[in-house]
């Protein structure tokens, strides 16, 4: 049955720079650009966008959903239609939060009086190339594209997203390897420094013993022995300083939905605080998605949300390479409230800081908590909090 072409007159597509844009944005942009459309992104999140989203939303919506509505409002009058796809949870082990299923209808009803047009598609399995491409192609036909052009665009879009994800994962993998190489080098330095310290301490002890014997026998200690003792003391001090300086740099894994970590307005205070303290930051959402998804089943066989699975799988893959973990979620995210609690209880032996951000929070409290967490990690790195 032929598809109605109710979107055939659309030429400029608006894409809100929020929610799943940070997970599938390359897919969406490439698809529309391949079909010849102009893509208009909303402006980066700022206080005006967040406040407008809060005004348009009901109190029960999470902060990320409110920000999304602000981005839609930011696009009003700047495009012919706004793209708001529906990602549903038909797959029991890699579905989505209900906000991703309902957001299309939510936008249509919220902006009904402004007569804002919404272009959408329904994706029931985000991990299936066939499912995603079919949904995009059906939407393209409704926008007036030929089946041939739709298929060509969907293939290019899928490949572009895959290449983007691979580049992100490869970049972080190189960083992980660099951290491990640095730690290996520092372990060698520390081992050599400890050996030098032990040798210097032994020489100093022998010199002190000789000096004591000389004092007891009322004999004058030779100048050479005094010089040797002094040099041994200096060598011992230098070796001790070298051991202290051989501590590896801190690395912290930030675990949050990409619409938080990649939005400077939402996560900037946390990430800037970490960077200002010379911490190497790794991101759970940058880990290879397929590897993380498969690894997540070691944690839970029943978790229904795809993004949360990928984040938990990333923790399992990287927990041995980091000194601590920072969880960031947007109040009051339902999936995160469940998974973060499980992470706090089940990931043992690794310090975890759990942060919740909302529209009312200032940055001072967040920065203080991050700084305290890093101080604790540095103290632990130097041997503090060690229990026999």
Image (cartoon, helix red, strand yellow):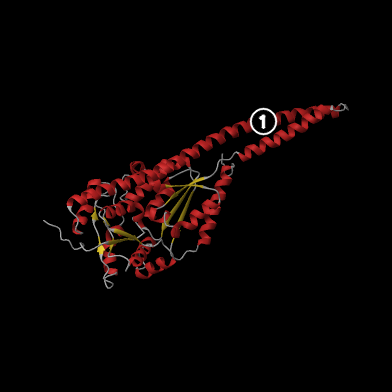
Evaluate whether residue 208 shows in this view.
no
Identify the secondary structure beneath mark 1. Answer: helix
Tell me which corner region of the image, top left, top right, bottom left or bottom right, holds residue 75. Answer: bottom left
Q: Looking at this rendering, what residue extends furthest in the front direction?
A: 36
Quick one: 11 or 273, which is closer to the camera? 11
Query: What quarter of the picture does the C terminus occupy?
Result: top right
Q: Give the image location of residue 153, x and y in percent.
A: 25, 50
Note whether 381 is above or below 35 in the view shown: above
| Quarter in which the N terminus is drawn | bottom left
What is the number of callouts on the image?
Answer: 1
Q: Residue under label 1, please give it.
A: 198
Please state the horizontal and vertical placement of residue 306, each as a whole percent of the image. Answer: 32, 49
- The residue lying at 53 percent from left, 37 percent from top is 183
Q: Residue extending furthest right?
A: 218
Residue 85 in picture, x, y percent from top left = 27, 58
172 relative to 143, above or below: above
Q: Nearer the viewer, residue 8 or 214?
A: 8
The residue positioned 85% from the left and 29% from the top of the image is: 215
**Residue under the point 84% across and 26% down:** 222
Question: Depth check: 55 or 6 in front?
Answer: 6
Which residue occupies the foreground of this view, 28 or 368? 28
* Location of residue 336 (image quadrant): bottom left
Residue at 53% across / 48% down in the picture? 279
- Relative vertical location of residue 5 with respect to residue 301 in this rendering, above or below: below
Q: Is residue 237 visible?
A: yes
Establish if 172 lies above or below 36. above
Q: Measured from the top left, where is residue 368 in percent x and y?
A: 54, 57
């Amino acid at each position: 049955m032929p598809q109605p072409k109710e979107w055939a007159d659309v030429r400029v597509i608006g894409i809100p720079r929020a929610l799943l844009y940070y997970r599938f944005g390359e897919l969406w942009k490439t698809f529309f650009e391949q079909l010849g459309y102009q893509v208009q992104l909303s402006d980066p999140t700022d206080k005006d966008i967040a406040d407008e989203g809060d005004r348009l939303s009901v109190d029960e919506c999470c902060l990320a959903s409110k920000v999304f509505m602000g981005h839609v409002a930011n696009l009003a009058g700047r495009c012919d239609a706004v793209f708001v796809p529906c990602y549903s949870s038909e797959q029991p082990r890699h579905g989505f939060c209900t906000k991703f299923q309902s957001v299309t209808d939510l936008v249509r009803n919220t902006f009904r009086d402004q007569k804002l047009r919404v272009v959408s598609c329904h994706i029931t399995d985000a991990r299936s190339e066939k499912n995603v491409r079919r949904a995009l192609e059906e939407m393209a036909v409704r926008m007036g594209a030929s089946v041939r052009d739709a298929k060509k665009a969907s293939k290019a879009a899928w490949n572009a997203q895959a290449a983007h994800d691979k580049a992100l994962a490869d970049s972080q993998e190189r960083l992980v390897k660099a951290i491990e190489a640095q730690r290996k080098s520092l372990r060698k330095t520390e081992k050599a420094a400890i050996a030098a310290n032990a040798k210097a301490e032994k020489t100093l002890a022998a010199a002190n013993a000789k000096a004591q014997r000389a004092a007891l026998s009322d004999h004058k200690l030779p100048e050479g022995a005094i010089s040797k003792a002094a040099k041994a003391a200096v060598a011992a001090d230098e070796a001790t300083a070298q051991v202290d300086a051989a501590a590896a740099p801190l690395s912290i894994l930030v675990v949050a939905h990409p619409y938080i970590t990649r939005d400077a307005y939402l996560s900037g205070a946390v990430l800037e605080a970490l960077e200002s303290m010379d911490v190497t930051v790794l991101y759970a959402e940058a880990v290879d998605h397929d590897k993380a998804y498969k690894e997540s089943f070691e944690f839970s066989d029943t978790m229904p949300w795809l993004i949360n699975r990928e984040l938990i799988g990333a923790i399992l893959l990287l927990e041995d390479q980091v000194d601590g973990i920072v969880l960031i979620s947007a109040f009051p995210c339902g999936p995160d409230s469940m998974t973060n609690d499980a992470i706090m209880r089940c990931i043992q032996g690794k310090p975890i800081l759990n942060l919740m951000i909302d529209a009312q929070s200032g940055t001072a409290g967040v920065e203080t908590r991050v700084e305290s967490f890093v101080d604790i990690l540095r103290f632990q790195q130097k041997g503090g909090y060690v229990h026999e």
